[in-house]
Structure formats: C-alpha cells, structure tokens
Amino acid sequence: MITYDMRDLADESLYEYLYRKIREDILAGRLKKGERMPSKRSFAKNQGVAVITVENAYSQLVAEGYLYSEPRRGFFVSQIDESLRLPQTAPLKIESEEVKSAGDSIGEEAGLPGISGSEAVPAAAAGREKGTEPGPPGGLPEIDLAQSRVSPDTFPFNTWAKLLREILQTKRHELLEPAPGAGIMPLRAAIAAYLLQYLNLRVSPDQIIIGAGTEYLYALLIRLLGTELVYAVELPGYPKTGRIYESNQVSVKYIPMDASGICVDALLESGADVAHISPSHQFPTGVTMPIGRRSELLSWCRESETHFLIEDDYDSEFRLSGRLIPPIMSIEDRGRVIYLNTFTKSLASTIRISYMVLPPALLQRYREKLGFYSCTVPSFEQYVLAEFIRRGYYEKHINRMRNYYRQKRNRLLHAISTSRLRTRTSVSGAEAGLHFLLYVKSEKTEAALTTLAAAQGVRVYGLSSYMAGGDRELRERWPEPCMVVNYQGLSNEAVDALPELLGKAWF
Amino acid sequence: MITYDMRDLADESLYEYLYRKIREDILAGRLKKGERMPSKRSFAKNQGVAVITVENAYSQLVAEGYLYSEPRRGFFVSQIDESLRLPQTAPLKIESEEVKSAGDSIGEEAGLPGISGSEAVPAAAAGREKGTEPGPPGGLPEIDLAQSRVSPDTFPFNTWAKLLREILQTKRHELLEPAPGAGIMPLRAAIAAYLLQYLNLRVSPDQIIIGAGTEYLYALLIRLLGTELVYAVELPGYPKTGRIYESNQVSVKYIPMDASGICVDALLESGADVAHISPSHQFPTGVTMPIGRRSELLSWCRESETHFLIEDDYDSEFRLSGRLIPPIMSIEDRGRVIYLNTFTKSLASTIRISYMVLPPALLQRYREKLGFYSCTVPSFEQYVLAEFIRRGYYEKHINRMRNYYRQKRNRLLHAISTSRLRTRTSVSGAEAGLHFLLYVKSEKTEAALTTLAAAQGVRVYGLSSYMAGGDRELRERWPEPCMVVNYQGLSNEAVDALPELLGKAWF
C-alpha cells in the first residue's frame, strides 16, 4: 500500500499533504490510470491518520478530476495526459474551516430529501456579478434572485478606511507619480504572492496587468490577440461575455457545455481560435472542469499557433467546500493560457479592479502593441488594495465571506427542505459559488414559472436566460425548467420566506 | 457708435458683459463681416467704462476669432457662418484674476527681447499628460521637459481626505450599490453644472458618460461610431491619440494643422469621417481655433451622415489669460459633436476619471449598443469627486493651480530673458496650458540639440517628436528646430537653472 513519509510534511495540514503527494504520484505516472486507491479506512490506518483526513484528500482529488469514485467499489485514478507540467510542489495554504469534517454537515450530507449534489445533471451553482440583466419580468417583486449587492455589514469599511488614511498620509509622492500602464508594482507583487499561496500559480509580478474590470481587460485582450481571430464562449454562460466580444466586432462562437465543461469536439469543429472559459467554476452551470478535460483543452491549444485559452477565474475564492481549484495556467508551460480574475466579486462590484496574467510571449507582445496605454485604475485604490492583500486582510475577508455565504446557503437549503419545494425540486451544485440551480418538477415552462413567481413578489431567472446567442439545438441540450438561484444579496428574512413563496406560486 | 444698455448687465463683470453683447451682435449679423470696431478709447468713453475693460473684451473676442486686429488700424469683425447656433446668453462666471490688467505683465507685454507671442508661427504652448514618451535620450538628465508630475504640495490632499472619510461614513449603502454604466448621477450632475457655468455648455447629466481615462473613452467611441469609419487626428499632435486609434484597428488619417487649427481642405480630401480635435488648445501647437474655422468644421459635419467631431478639451481649464474658450459643442445643435474632458490633467494623472458628453441621437445608440458595459471608475472615487466639485473645491483648486502655473511660466520666461537664450530663441504661445514652444535660432537639427541638452542634464523634446504618423511632406510644413517646453513638473530651482543649462548646451 502507498505510504507517505510524514517527514515530508511541510507547512500544511495533513489532508493537504496527502492530497499533494497523491496528485504528484498521479502526475508522475507512479499511480496509473484505472488503479484502485486503498480504501479510506485502510489507508488511514496504514498512514496513521484519521479517516476524515483521507476522505478530505480524496474528495479534493475527485473535485479536481484526479480520482473518480464508483459506488461501493471505491476510488480510482483518472486518465491524465502525461504531457501536463508537474505543478510546483510548494505546499498550498488552505483555510482550515474549509475542510469537510464530521461535524460540518451541509445540504447533501444531511440527507435532505429532494436535494442532491447530482452528478448526472452537469450543473452546479455559480455566482457572478450582474446588474439588472437579464430583464426583469413585470410586477414589483420584493425578492430578486439576480441581485448581487454586497451588504454594507459585510464589507470591511473600517479596515479600508484605515488603509485609505494611511496611504493618503504616507504615499503622497507616489500617489502623484505617473503609474506604469500595467499597474503599480506593490499591487502586482501582492497578487503574485496570493496566486502562489492559494492557487499554486507561480508567476512574476511583471506578468500581471491591472485593469478597471474584466470587461475592460477582455477588450484589451482582443486587441492583443487580434480582431481577426474567432472567439469561443460557453453556452449556457454569462450573457455579457458574448456581448462584449460582439461589441468589439470580433466573430463569436457559442460552444455547448457538458458535465465536464466546454465540449472540446464542438470547439474544434467551430474553428474558434480563442476559448473563453471558467474551468474552476462555470457560470451558470457551476461545472468544475476535471483534470482530464483540462488536459484535452491543452491538447487543443497545441494544434494551432492561434489557439489560446482565456481562463476567467471570476469567483474561485468562493468555493464553499474543499480547497480552491488550481487554475489551468498552473499546469501549462507553453504560454497558451491567459489567467483573469477580479476583486469586483470578492470585495464589491463597485471596486473596479481586475487583473490578467499573461504568459511571457504575450507579455512581450503586450509591451510592444499596448504598453503605451495608461492604467485605468486610480493609483490610490491600487495602493490601498495592495496593503489590504499584503497585510492579510484580504485573506481574512475571503474566509469570513466564505463562512457567511456557506451559512446563508445552508439556511436556504434547510428552508427548502422544510417547504413544499422539498419533493418537487432538486438542487444542484450547492458546493461552490453564491448560486445554485433549482430544477423544478413541473410541466410548466420556465417563462410561466417566472411569471407565477413574480406574482408572489419573487423575481426568478431561468437557465434559458443564459442561453442568449445559442441556437435552438444548443438550448435543447439542457433540461427545463431550471432556475438560477443567487442568494448573495438575500437577507435572512428573504431566505426564510423564499421557498414558501415559490411553493405557493408553483404548486 | 454701438452702445450697450448697462441695465442688461447680469451677474458678470463689465468686461464679460461687453464681450457677451458684442459676440451676440456678431452672431446675429448686427455687426457685419469686415466692419471696423470703434477704437478702445472712444468705445470706453462712449460706454462709460475704463479702457482696460474694452481691451479685455476685445482680446477675448480676438482669442476666440470673432474679431481680428490689424496693426495701427484697429479691430474688425471676422467672417462668421450665420448658421451657427446662438449660444445661450446666460452670463458666464469668470475668475477675476484671469482678466488681463495693466499690472499683470506676462512675457510678451513686458517686452522681453526675443520672446513673442508670434502669430506668424501658428504655435502656442500646450500641456498634456504624458508618461515617459517620446523616448528619452541617453545619459542621466536631471530636468525632464516631458514630465507632467503634479507636486504633492499642490494637490488638495486634506480636502480629498476629508471627503473620503465623509463618503465612507455616510454612503456605505450607495458605495456597494451596483452603479449605472455611465457613472453615478451626482457626479454627472456636478459636471453638467460645471460645464454650464464655466464653458457655456448646456447639457443634461444623462448625456454624460464617465470612464477611466480618455483612452478608455476613445475605444468606447470607436465602438459607438463604428470601426468601419475613418478617423482623423491632428499633426503635429499628441502621439498617443493616433496610436490608440491604430491599436483599435481603425483607419487613421493624419491631417496637418495651420495657424487656425486642423486644415479643413485636407480633412475633406482625406475622406475621413470622424475628426479628433482640440480646438480650445491644440497640443503641441497650442493653437486656439477661431470661430471662423469652427464654423467651417461644422459645415464639414453637415456634408455626410458619418461626419462627427470629437472635441477633446483635455486642458481647457489651464488657459492662463482671458476667459475659458467655449467648446464647439456649445454652438452646435445637430448632434455631430462629442465633447471629451478629463480630471487627469486638472487634478492628477493618477486619478483616472474622464467623461464624454454625447449628443442625444448618439446617447440613444450608446444605450442600445454599449449600455450594458459596467462603469470603469470606482463608485467611491466618483462620490468623492462629485462632492469636490459640488462644494466648490474644484473651482478653487483650478484657480489656485492656474495662478501657480502662471507664476511658474512667468518665472521661466524671466529666466530665459536674462540668459543667453534671450536673443537666440523665441517663445511662442505662453498664454495657455502648461507648455510653450521654444524656437531655437540654430543651424543644428533638433536631434543634435536634444543630444547636446542631454549632456547638460536636460531632457528636451523637439516638435518633430509629435509628428509620428505623418509623412515627410507634412513634417516639413513646420519650422525646425523647435522644442516643446513643459514646465508643469519643474521645481523653481529647475526653472531658474534651465535657460542657463540650455544656453551652455547649444551656444
């Protein structure tokens, strides 16, 4: 039986250590495709750790696609492309509350009837900044399931104010200094340190370009990669992404999703050059792309010099169970992946700071073609955020918000399980993000259910709202009716009332 | 002789009143093309005001092109296109220190030898944000004449900090509210009030779109007007403008400047659809476009449905003598002018807030095509700036900075007049902006003079640095050698030392 030397344990938890060692063995081919892993109990005994420790390590490896489980048979090694770069072996810091423990029961573990983290349905919850779109139905609903407002009670105003004062007093000279087009170095360094520590992504601060929102960065990327290229987006997906490509007058292809993420066959067939994807947590399906599909996408990248992946990791911070999913960029070394992330989601939508990480060759091209552009983010905000991250406030904030959202989700799942939705709906993908999908067992259409909900004062949005741009055939791949439930902006009162109101509206 | 009823005097100075009444008479055709104005002395006597009052009114009318003067013959009415819309007659507020008075002697009036506000040379000083381009020569210069850093002593840090604290305390809810794509309404309302009061431009706050820098807004405008259109920029001009159009992959034409601004014949011949101009203060020539040329440009607009003017008023606040020049948009009513301005220049380059004013038809198109874009400026900065303007701090700041720069300019002109540059150079266009042109009487090329200056620790930039994009024929229209002197970032010590160092380097 495999045994790992506990003397290799670095500054990490036992579960992280086992996760890391097993992953290394899989990537190195020491654990082979199809090989059966020892049972949790026997591995735990052999290794001298608790069963829950092995369980947590296996769960994370399943979430990332390195292992798969078969009911009553156990855990097996997935097929992994051996060309994948071995990730850095630096231990990753993982927030301890994140680890699933016997005492921490969430929806599916508590065995709530009608609620399952179904794997047959390739959809899980996802959250993403949204204004008012897609368009609201008539009436005057009191609960809006697309509202993504951050509550003033949860934003760290006092810390932010303290840093503002400090920066204003100590950095007067720097604040008026012409800033580099890619952003001030202290912020880029703080982000690089964060990426290494939490996402196992090792990049130089030079590779990081700061911009006023991901929408702005998309436009910059189009100019960098070329307007003559064809851009692929996921369907269903965030409707704005496709619209932004279209408004930049480039050709856009809508590629269907399946249970593992964007369909590589369809991508290849479409003739697209650049694929815009969210592998760690797709919106709105919530699919986490397993390592096998990631590897297929990297093979696709190697097929042409114009093939690139734009890895839009917009809310990876809010994974509600297990550790954060390392980005594709962390396992790729040919410079074909551009990583994008934002503080708009993790802090507040009105803080307009996002960033992208360019591979070295594109960085060179960026400097030549676009290096003359001024940075779109005020230096002041950049210095404040840099200190916010550097001093650990960002980490604390994320951890606090993750707990906050986890509690909100649990409360909502509990309310559903005690309402008449209990037997008539099923929840999918509540393990991440600030949304989940609610499949409704009804003969009515999404549109009809939406209207009925509005009459009860609830504004709901069907999955079909996120199918803009796709044709009928693409839309019909997804079961209806299904609602995207965003609980980010809901008060506890709204959470408690919601299932009752929907039950009254629909059944 | 013309006489104006003093009972019409509104809340304005006598000089502003006379300026306004004469302008109205010219636009209404009551004063006709070529008509000779009464002499300053007799008009003053007849009207019962001081001669200096008439002189100030005539000067402003000459600066805006409504009158022209002939040496020893007096002032005459210019040819004005009668289709021009009569500007609103609301009195404009003008800062009193701005008015030229007998006691306020600047360069040309003090009769400094070798320094003249030459009209034969169609160039005057201009200031504009710049990073480090155009490329620096070798060596380690101590004085950089392209540096546009704002000194920490002049930025209103205390007021800014006070407003920051206040907004953070009182607007927590609003700060986390999803903001409109065009910017928060209080800021747009404050800007609209400012435009009416200082620039006679009456627009609705709805027409104002806030963005993170004019570079961002240029890109938005291209998407709004169309990438299939041809865009014209001025030559010489700010090099970034052309580069930004090129990097957005639209066709760009470089149109020569003459003493009155962009050449309309050349513009027509180029087949361009959209002309990007800075009529109130062109960079780097400093030309203020007279009303006659403005009118020609408006005629050009009427020739095709695709013809538009982008009026980039980037530093109109820093006119150092006379009143601010009203924008073309204020005299046009067919919706063919887009007005652009920025706080980057008037506050600090690291505050990334700019705005554009769209005519109603384009506003409609913006809402349909681009209304889904998020605003790129943090709400926090927007609320602070809105209060800064609304409470009059912005006006105070501009007035203080105008005095500050006027003193800096006067000090530099004085230093030139007492150095060996006195008889070997001539200054052009020191009446506005934060730059002026320094024509050098030398057989050496600009490149050679640049190298010689660098050896003395001074980084200078020739006018030819701003000719990128133009062909040889266009470049040869301008006399060499000529240096663009930006005094914004110079300390008093640097100002005092500069002429001595350049004298040593060149003669």
Image (cartoon, coloured by chain):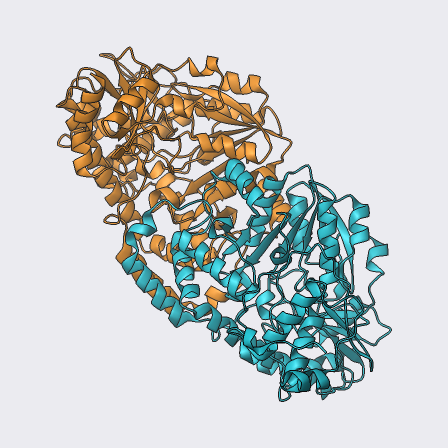
Chain colours: A orange, B cyan
Q: Residue at x 48, y 50 (%)?
A: A205
Q: Which x, y percent locates residue B419?
A: 73, 87
User: Total number of numbered labels?
Assistant: 0
Left or right: residue A11 versus residue A49 is right
Instruction: Report if residue A13 is visible in the image.
Output: no
Question: Please, is residue B89 above or below residue A182 in the view?
Answer: below
Which quarter shows the N terminus of chain B?
Answer: bottom right
Query: For the view shown, which residue lies furthest in the top direction?
Result: A443
Instruction: Report if residue B172 is visible in the image.
Output: yes
Q: Which x, y percent locates residue B41?
A: 71, 86
Which quarter shows the C terminus of chain B?
Answer: bottom right
Quadrant in the picture for residue B100: bottom right
Quadrant in the picture for residue B186: bottom left
Judge by depth and name the residue closer to the eye, A270 or B216.
Answer: B216
Q: Residue at x 28, y 55 (%)?
A: A157
Q: Which x, y percent locates residue A150?
A: 29, 44
Quadrant in the picture for residue B15: bottom right
Judge by depth and name the residue closer to the eye, A75 or B103.
Answer: B103
Q: Residue at x 44, y 64 (%)?
A: B389
Left or right: residue B384 versus residue A19 is right
Q: Which x, y percent locates residue A307?
A: 58, 28
Left or right: residue A121 versus residue B321 is left
Judge by depth and name the residue closer to the eye, B121 or A367.
Answer: B121
